[in-house]
Amino acid sequence: MKLEVRGLSKRFGKTKVLNSAEFSLQSGEIIGLLGKNGAGKTTLLRLLAGISRAESGDFYLDGQPWHASKNENRRMIAMLAHQPWLYENLTAIENLRFYDQLYHCQLGETALRQLLAKVGLEANARQVVRGFSRGMKQRLAIARCLLHQPKILLMDEPFTGLDDDGSQMLLQVLQEEHAKDHIILASTHELSQLGTIADGYLRVEAGKVLAASPTEVLA
Amino acid sequence: MRQYMASLWALIKKDLIQEWRSKDIISAMLAFAVLTLFIFNYALSLSPQAQASIATGIVWVLVVFAGTLGINRSFSAEQDQGCFDALLLGSPDLSLVYLAKMLSNFLIMALLALFLLPVYSLLYNYSLFNGLFVGLILLGAWAYSAMATLLAGLSVQTRMRDMLLPVLLFPLLIPVNIAVVKAGAGILEGLPFADISIWFTLLAAYAVIITTISSMVFEYVIKE
């Protein structure tokens, strides 16, 4: 699976964040998305997810025109954003059950609990999310992302809030998704974690998305 | 269709569970409505004849103002935790998000209205328990929720959301307010249904048209 992006532009008021950006993502690769604060990494991830509207630009999946906002395509994508996208007055298991119903995954209670166990929250299944720490919310958000087995995983600073165990769990999860030949794009400022498993990097700079080699980035 | 209904139910259930646990919306609405009703009770001494023409106005003003207070906060969970984006990404059809939120808001408003009717009857010693009157208030609540939910989705993404919703909403609710007050006064004065049916038709048409249009445009309203 290959996702190609051509001529992607986005502006906020007078500021042009992306200017005819072009790049491609290949399945089975973990790509780190780099760039300074405000460079447009989050905007790029949101455009790829179809959450934001691009000013211009075309997407192609395996050479065919592809629109992230189409109902059937949206299900292929999961996004781990800055905010956890969780309902604070629902318990951890209720949050997963809600997204399970929304995506029509029809996972049973056992599968949902297994997912919670995978992110280390099995003991907190019946706890209301309002009482969770930042790291616990991040873990639950990771479980939410994996729920519908997306083919394209977009992650915005995925290691934020995670302790050492949490970071190891996320690396494990990313490697499992990598083995399933999924497309993984993760923005980061902290290369000590992602740098251990990334296959390549993209750098957002002056509105363009440029490929960067691992040796250059890690040097 | 079965999947659509399952998703719709999941969205409504999520809103109702959240509200049941936090009571953020209903407590603010009830406190406002009951306090205002008490103030009206002491401020106005109404004869039975005056009751018939004024009761609907008092009840509807409370429903609308308390409803605005509640609906303004109905998207706060989505906004505060970024769940709007999750719904944009995960919902099989974005009209579902609107319909679910509209129905949740309607249920909360219907609950408020059904609570206010006996309180009003007790305080003013004037019964409002008339099937047609209850139906009118529920139909009005539907028309109101249909418009208010769309505008709440629009205003919640702005910094002036608390001020913007009433400013946008109240002018667009003028037909609903007139229809409810006119029909309600007619019902309480004992007019035959044929004399007030035009107001019911107007309300039903407004509710259906706004619900349909809002379902279609909601995606454009909430998307960046």
Image (spheres, rainbow, N blue to C red):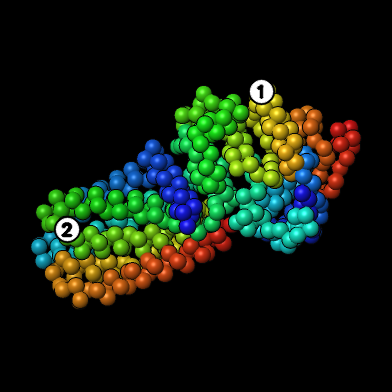
Q: Which mark is residue B128?
A: 2
Q: Chain of mark 1?
A: A
Q: Is residue A207 left or right of residue B137?
A: right
Amino acid type, label 1: Asp
- State the residue at coordinates (14%, 50%): B122
The label shown at residue A180 is none
Tell me the quarter of the picture where residue B46 sits: bottom left
Residue B199 in view, yes or no: yes
Query: Circle 1 is placed at which residue position?
Result: A165
SS assignment at label 1: helix
Q: Residue at x 9, y 62 (%)?
A: B47
Q: Tell me what residue is drawn at x 41 percent, y 56 percent.
A: B102
* Dot 1 crowding, Cα within 10 Å, few <14, some 14–19, many 20+: few
2 and 1 marks in contact (CB < 8 Å): no
Does B81 appear above or below B125?
A: above
* Quadrant for the C terminus of chain A in the image: top right
Q: Residue at x 52, y 64 (%)?
A: B217
Q: Quadrant of residue A36?
A: top right
**Residue B61 position within the rendered picture, expressed as x and y whole percent measured from the top left:** 29, 59
Amino acid on which the number 2 mark rests in the picture: Leu
Q: CA distance from mark 2 to mark 1?
A: 62 Å
Circle 2 SS class: loop
Q: Is residue B161 visible?
A: no
Q: Which image quadrant for residue B146? A: bottom left
The x and y percentages for residue B205 are 36, 71
Q: Are marks 2 and 1 on the same chain?
A: no
Question: Front-most of A137 and A124?
Answer: A124
Left or right of residue A8, residue B113 in this image:
left
Q: Label 2: how many residues lie within 10 Å, few (<14), some (14-19) or many (20+)?
A: many
